[in-house]
Image: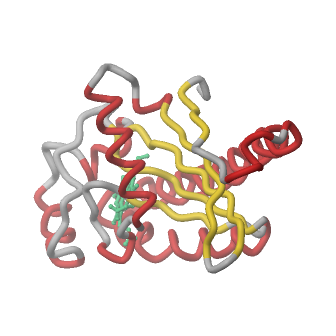
Amino acid sequence: MLKGVMTGLLFGCLAASPAMAQDMEALKGEAKNVMMKFGGALKGELKAGMEAGGPVNAIGVCNEKAPAIAAKVSGETGWTVRRTSHKLRNPASAPDALEQKVLQTFLDRIAKGEAAADLAFATVVEENGKKTFRFIKAIPTEELCLNCHGEKLNPEVVAKLDKVYPGDKARGFKPGEMRGVFTLSKPL
Ligand code: HEC
């Protein structure tokens, strides 16, 4: 699953340090664990919400619970976890400059035949004067996601989405397509 991982350019002498390369591997492993925790909790809430009251109900669950889950995972792990996308539903989840660049790189790689499920990117950047590890992983669209992000949506879902997200661009996805990315960071 990680065969598509590429490591971003490190700065200056760090690039030559084998210790740093090892740290990068360890950080990537840590990032994946945090991501699974976040993704697993999100999907759990989503499924529970769908079972309790169908997709219209689950829209509300997702909208209210996603930020709470992200805050909980951040508190437990010290990592910042978010989701963003090239086709946004919630404008508050807009990508920053690095995420925008990586989303475009992922789209280019997909256009050349790579699978969204294989795409990940890791790098160390300087943010507010502090070295920060960043990890970005593509999220493929699954069957479950089509209820609210697919091509044919239930009219009640459309009505609710139109109301809550007037500028929604996160519709019309097909299974396997990149829906967006998980984006994680940790100050070093
Ligand atoms: C019940 C409806 C529903 C289902 C099912 C659903 N989503 Fe969403 N999705 C939403 C809503 C609502 C938001 C906006 C949440 C918010 O306000 O932050 C969203 C936001 C997102 C975002 C964040 C970026 C953005 O566009 O705002 C990603 C990424 C995402 N969904 C991926 C998925 C994936 C992958 C699946 C399947 C595993 C999925 N969603 C299933 C309703 C749904």
Residue in the image at 53% along x and 57% along y: 183
* Side of 134 relative to 136 (left or right): right
Nearer the observer, 105 or 84: 105
Residue at the spot 17% in from the left edge and 78% down from the top edge: 163
> How many circles with numbers are drawn on the protein?
0
| Residue closest to the eye, 108 or 78 | 108
Q: Which of the two residues, 66 or 188, is positioned nearer the viewer here?
A: 188
Please identify the residue farthest to the right as the structure is shown.
19
Left or right of residue 148, residue 80 in this image: right
Q: Residue furthest front?
A: 12
How far across and down, in percent of the image, does residue 24 sit? 76, 44
Image region (quadrant) for ligand 1 = bottom left
Q: Quadrant of the N terminus?
A: top right
The x, y position of residue 157, in whole percent, is 20, 61
Quarter-wise, where is residue 128 in the image? bottom right
Q: In which quarter of the view is residue 151 placed?
A: top left
